[in-house]
Amino acid sequence: MTKRKVDILVISDVHLGTYGCQSKALLKYLNSIKPHRVILNGDIIDMWQFSKRYWPKSHMKVIQKIIKWTSQGIKVDYITGNHDELLRKFAGFKMGSLSIENKLVLDIDGKKTWIFHGDVFDVTMKHSKWLTRLGSHGYDLLILINACCNWISEKMGKGKISLSKNIKNSVKQAVKFINDFEKICAEIALSKGYEYVLCGHIHQPEMKTVSTDKGSIQYLNSGDWIENLTSLEYANGAWSLYKFDESQFETDVDDEVDDLVMMSNDKIFDQLLSEFTVGSEGLNKATK
């Protein structure tokens, strides 16, 4: 299969390690493209959820795919989010073509672009972290309930329903309304002289012009891989919002296999460390 070339790929809010993560769909998408640069814009690995000891094989395959890209010399920027905030103390760390950052500023074809996760502007994160964590666990449970409802609905010959998406969107819209998330991003970006601002965090894919008293700026949000299944792509001098469509991909045998795996936290981290070590060794061999 010929892979589609993408100059810059931006994905965020994958939440590996949670029941809601659509890792199989993400893998199909990642295997279908050939990116020149990859930006992981926060909440890729959900470190809040490791206490559940839930780490399916498909989640590890996503990590393996990213590591394979780095071993091939593809530049991968891991920007930290609130669910993987433990990595923030490693900002500035580099290993081969992989780097960890809290934010990123790029000049993309002459356009100054500010890229960060976005939780810094979220009042609920800043002042009520315990409440946000509680909401995260509740959302994960809702995803499980939603999956059961969809299984029953499909057995009855009806279409899928999206309880979790409707509830999540209503809550997120309320948070966004209170914080005026997009406007704050735009105003600060304009004050710094940026022309584009790219975020994640609110699980709301978007591409639009935001106008303020200080001027206008292009606001882009990569969405998530829980329910929207979206990413941002830069190719041929323009940004576009990608939306995963199952009908465009062939059904794999693995799609029908239950890959649920329960492991201790230590084993999860051991596997992650092993994958990064192997990837690093592969990169060293390739550069010799």
Image (tube, rainbow, N blue to C red):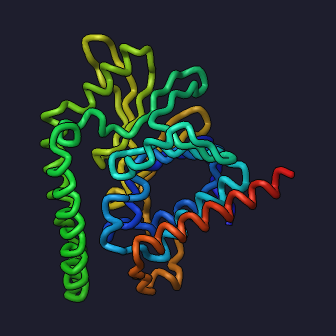
Residue 71, horizontal then vertical, whole percent? 71, 56
Q: Position of residue 220 (x, y in %)?
A: 39, 36
Position of the N terminus by quadrant: bottom right
Would residue 190 appear left or right of 92 to someone viewing this image? left
Residue 176 point in image, percent of width and height: 19, 38
Q: Is residue 64 above or below residue 168?
A: below
The foreground one among 70 and 204 is 70
Depth order, front residue of 268/79: 268
**How many badges with numbers are in the image?**
0
In this rendering, the answer to whether 227 lies above or below 100 is below
Q: Is residue 281 above or below residue 260?
A: above
Image vertical order of residue 3 relative to residue 147, above or below: above
Q: Residue at x 36, y 13 (%)?
A: 191
Specify the quadrant of the image occupied by residue 7. top right
Question: In terms of depth relative to the viewer, which is nearer, 254 or 160?
Answer: 254
- Horizontal relation, residue 212 to residue 173: left or right: right
**Which residue: 17% across, 58% down?**
134
Residue 137, given in percent of the width and then of the height, sits at: 21, 63
Residue sitting farthest toward the top: 214
Q: Residue at x 67, y 46 (%)?
A: 97
Residue shown at the point (55%, 28%) measured from the top left:
106
User: Where is residue 263, by image quadrant?
Assistant: bottom left
- Residue 247 visible within the image: no
The answer to whether residue 97 is visible is yes
